[in-house]
């Protein structure tokens, strides 16, 4: 699993790779969270996410939007994700720690996941996701 | 420049129907030769995409700070017939009613001997950055009232003076807010964040009025050369982001339900008159009001710091004006000689209503409304005024800022935050931010020159220059 941050003038664009679709989704979540709340280590905070959407693109946007919500509303820095995907249904266990400004501050707030530029494709054996996030 | 773009005048360009399949009207954008070199093909494609949306009136428009966004280009303006047209969160953005206000003070630059202390105190007083929370804990009822009454709620609860309200677009309180269209998730995010600045390009800046271009308007707006002013740039925080996210999902389904064909999913929309369209408008207006209350509460925190540090009176710091630059509004415009009710989307564009517009307070009847264009960190900001030309050409709209030319990733490779901070300090500008990376991302050189953008809108006449303000100190998230 890996991710890169690509050039996008106004926003942030990620390209994420995973061995399976679920791995790629987990890595996308990590990319988003590292951008917002860096230096996180999993320490006692867990949240479970269940999402069902019409297609894989919406599932990705809905999953990441749910993380933005949980992180903002609950003051949580997330960094580890176990994701399972069955059809258009996703469950995820998200681990992290309580947000502390001294440790996790200074990141870029992600306002939303855009459908523009959202794509999911195969490259050899890997799944690749591209995501544009509004910062 | 992409194939098929037509030059209309030195500053005006057309994207003809047929540039992209399904365009209903031509696209129009405004740029000078020097700004053209930074124009991204993706931004023009996005402008053409907007022109495919049902009910669009006259032209899909983009201001000289046009750049590649999501859904609409940033700098995009489009009006839709309220009976046949659509409403779309892609024409507003996640940060509903992101906007700017300018606060006048009785201080002059020599009064700011302890400028570093001022910046530090403001940084301590105004919560900034990711995870920032306000001291105030709103009750459910208070949040509800705030979403309905906006800046008026804040003033009635002691966070301002009555004069502040008249000096806000929509009097700081947009009609049509429907709190039933704001989810519990959005409310949860809204409770702790009223009176917080956020991160990214949001800032609070101490400025000096450096030049006056239009003495009459400047006097009327309450600014004079050498005066110290404060500019506040922020939006509706997590509450607004969540309202956009929730309704985007609903409108995706509505797009299919109403058989609307779109070239970009982020333009998801519904007829303005449909239940889905009305729900989005109501939720968006509630979030816009939250943003006006938010800027009002930051204004209160700022005034209190200045009162304490300089012994001036709270009432000696009137609001010059407050503008929204990410919003959709129901407005009446003259189209082909006839009055027409339209829903104007402004995504990274500022309302610039001209003289005599009925929505403006009477004191601006002759000048048009004040228009505030923030520069980037370290570059000048501008005060302009709305014009009759804007009413004719751009549904009463102008640019909103400088517009980025370099990505955040590239900025961090090109420049070091520490160097920028030191360089700005040598120029007399004190920057306070949570870390060096956030300074690098917003370095002055990653933006188009703000002078050139406002020169173009002034030359076009879609707003006219009133004053130039230069930064003295900045706090950012």
Image (cartoon, coloured by chain):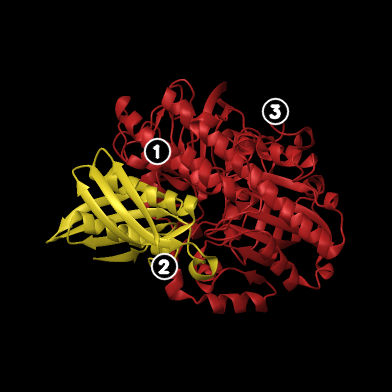
Chain colours: A yellow, B red
x and y, in percent, of residue B47 in the image: 41, 43
Judge the density around disc 2: few (<14), some (14-19), many (≥20) Cα neighbours within 10 Å.
many
Question: Considering only vertical position in the picture, is B328 above or below A75?
Answer: above
Marks 1 and 2 sit apart, C-alpha to C-alpha, by 30 Å
Image quarter of residue B354:
top right
Q: Nearer the viewer, residue A91 or A45?
A: A45
Residue A116 is at least partly visible in this image: no
Asked if badges 3 and 2 are on one and the same chain, I answer: no
Q: Residue at x 57, y 30 (%)?
A: B177
Where residue B248 is drawn, which disc sits there?
1
**Tag 3 or tag 1, which sits nearer the N-term?**
1
Residue that appears at 72% across and 66% down: B121
Q: Position of residue A98 (x, y in %)?
A: 47, 61
Q: Is residue B314 left or right of residue B276?
A: right
Same chain check for tags 1 and 3 = yes
Q: What residue is pinned by disc 2?
A: A40
**Residue lying furthest left:** A124
Q: Secondary structure under badge 1?
A: helix
Location of mark 3 (residue): B358
Crowd band around label 3 with a 10 angstrom C-alpha radius: few (<14), some (14–19), many (20+): few
């Amino acid at each position: 699993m890996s991710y890169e941050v690509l050039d996008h003038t106004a926003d942030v664009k990620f390209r994420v790779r995973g061995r399976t679709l679920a791995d790629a989704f987990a890595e996308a979540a990590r990319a988003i969270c590292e951008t917002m709340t860096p230096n996180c280590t999993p320490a006692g905070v867990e949240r479970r996410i269940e999402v069902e959407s019409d297609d894989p693109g919406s599932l990705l946007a809905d999953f990441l939007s749910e993380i933005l919500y949980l992180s903002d509303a609950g003051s949580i820095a997330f960094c580890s994700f176990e994701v399972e995907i069955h059809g258009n249904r996703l469950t995820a266990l998200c681990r992290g720690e309580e947000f502390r400004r001294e440790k996790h501050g200074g990141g870029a707030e992600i306002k939303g996941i855009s459908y523009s530029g959202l794509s999911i494709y195969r490259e050899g054996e890997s799944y690749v996701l591209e995501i544009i996030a509004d910062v | 420049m992409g194939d098929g773009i037509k030059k209309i005048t030195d500053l005006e360009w057309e994207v003809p129907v047929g540039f992209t399949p399904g365009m209903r009207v031509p696209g129009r954008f405004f740029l000078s030769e020097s700004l053209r070199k930074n124009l991204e093909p993706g931004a023009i494609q996005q402008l053409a995409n907007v022109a495919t949306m049902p009910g669009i009136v006259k032209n899909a428009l983009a201001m000289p700070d046009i750049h590649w966004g999501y859904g609409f280009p940033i700098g995009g303006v489009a009006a839709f017939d309220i009976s046949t047209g659509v409403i779309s969160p892609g024409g507003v953005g996640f940060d509903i009613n992101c906007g700017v206000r300018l606060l006048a003070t009785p201080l002059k630059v020599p009064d700011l001997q302890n400028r570093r202390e001022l910046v530090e105190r403001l940084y301590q007083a105004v919560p900034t950055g990711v995870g920032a929370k306000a001291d105030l804990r709103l009750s459910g009822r208070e949040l509800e009232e705030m979403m309905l009454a906006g800046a008026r709620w804040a003033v009635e609860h002691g966070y301002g003076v009555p004069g502040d309200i008249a000096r806000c677009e929509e009097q700081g309180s947009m009609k049509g807010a429907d709190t039933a269209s704001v989810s519990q998730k959005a409310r949860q995010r809204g409770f702790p964040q009223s009176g917080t600045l956020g991160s990214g390009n949001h800032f609070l800046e101490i400025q000096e009025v450096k030049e006056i271009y239009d003495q009459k308007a400047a006097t009327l707006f309450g600014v004079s050369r050498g005066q110290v002013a404060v500019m506040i740039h922020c939006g509706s925080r997590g509450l607004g982001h969540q309202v956009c996210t929730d309704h985007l999902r609903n409108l995706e389904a509505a797009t299919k339900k109403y058989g609307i064909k779109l070239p970009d999913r982020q333009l998801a929309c519904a007829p303005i008159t449909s239940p889905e369209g009305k729900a989005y408008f109501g939720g968006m207006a509630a979030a816009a009001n939250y943003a006006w209350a938010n800027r009002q509460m930051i204004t209160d925190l700022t005034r209190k710091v200045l009162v304490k540090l300089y012994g001036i009176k709270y009432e000696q710091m009137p609001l010059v004006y407050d503008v929204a630059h990410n919003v959709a509004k129901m407005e009446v415009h003259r189209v082909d000689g006839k009055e027409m009710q339209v829903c104007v989307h402004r995504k990274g564009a500022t309302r610039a209503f001209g003289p005599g517009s009925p929505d403006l307070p009477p004191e601006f009847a002759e000048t048009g409304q004040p228009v505030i264009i923030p520069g980037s960190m370290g570059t000048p900001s501008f005060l302009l005024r709305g014009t009759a030309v804007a009413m004719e050409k751009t549904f009463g709209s102008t640019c909103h800022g400088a517009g980025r030319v370099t990505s955040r990733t590239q900025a961090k490779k090109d420049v070091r935050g520490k160097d920028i901070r030191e360089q700005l300090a040598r120029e007399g500008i004190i920057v306070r931010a949570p870390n060096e990376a956030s300074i690098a991302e917003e370095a002055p050189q990653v933006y188009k020159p703000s002078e050139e953008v406002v020169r173009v809108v002034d030359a076009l006449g879609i707003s006219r220059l009133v004053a130039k303000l230069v930064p003295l100190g900045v706090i950012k998230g």
